[in-house]
Amino acid sequence: DQQVKQNSPSLSVQEGRISILNCDYTNSMFDYFLWYKKYPAEGPTFLISISSIKDKNEDGRFTVFLNKSAKHLSLHIVPSQPGDSAVYFCAASPAAGSYQLTFGKGTKLSVIP
Amino acid sequence: KAGVTQTPRYLIKTRGQQVTLSCSPISGHRSVSWYQQTPGQGLQFLFEYFSETQRNKGNFPGRFSGRQFSNSRSEMNVSTLELGDSALYLCASSAGVLQETQYFGPGTRLLVL
């Protein structure tokens, strides 16, 4: 049973426009969420995180929104750049008891120049 | 600060052999987690070590084991290799407290023939 789901395997966006990547989770024990960016044959690179006590966190061009009631989070990239083309993973960890990250299957973002 | 380093980067083994992978965390980090990435299953948690103790373990067979040394460096061992163990093995380090970001190394690509 997938506890973290990224339902869009791929997304294409024009350079300069907004990219919106979505993530849903089922485990109500999750309370810390992260987004990672990954290039092939490399480790994931941390982008941005959000705690469940917040509903929004911004870092430069990246903003993460969290809707706890809907168990949904999204990553907005504005403006999108060709260098943003990569696979984006959503990850979640619980409030207590475990330090493991549970990952979604990823969304491949292609930013078209 | 230097990032997480993993050695070797690439490895080819045959079925039935065993393999040891190494991970050096970011200086000052006491937690090391290991993940397996495959095309079918995505990123899956193997285990996490903190101060030389295994705190969490994922749903993998006993052929997968690990340890952590007093300098926080960690090793992961897979015995009696199977074809399905071919994957990218990722190590992540963190300070080891809840809601702490995990930073990943570049990974070790293991191919089992």
Image (cartoon, rainbow, N blue to C red):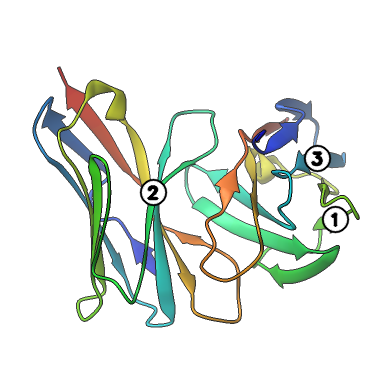
The chain ID associated with circle 3 is B
Q: Position of residue B46 (x, y in %)?
A: 67, 59
Q: Is residue A88 left or right of residue B84?
A: left
Q: Is residue A34 left or right of residue A22?
A: right
The front one of B45 and B52 is B52
Residue designated by label 3 = B22
Secondary structure under the numbered disc 3 in the rendered image:
strand
The front one of B14 and A109 is A109
Q: Position of residue A112 (x, y in %)?
A: 16, 22
Seen at 70% across and 68% down, the residue is B57
Secondary structure under the numbered disc 2 in the rendered image:
strand
Task: Find residue B30 and report its image quarter.
Answer: bottom right
Say what amino acid the circle numbered 1 marks: Gln
Q: Position of residue A69 (x, y in %)?
A: 21, 81
The chain ID associated with circle 1 is B
Q: Residue furthest top?
A: A113
Q: Which mark is residue A56?
A: none
The front one of B63 and B15 is B63
Residue designated by label 2 = A89
Say what amino acid the circle numbered 2 marks: Phe
Seen at 41% across and 75% down, the residue is A31
Against A73, residue A80 (above or below) is above
The front one of B88 and A90 is A90
Q: Is residue A96 left or right of residue A15?
A: right
- Labels 2, 1: front one: 1
Seen at 62% across and 51% down, the residue is B35
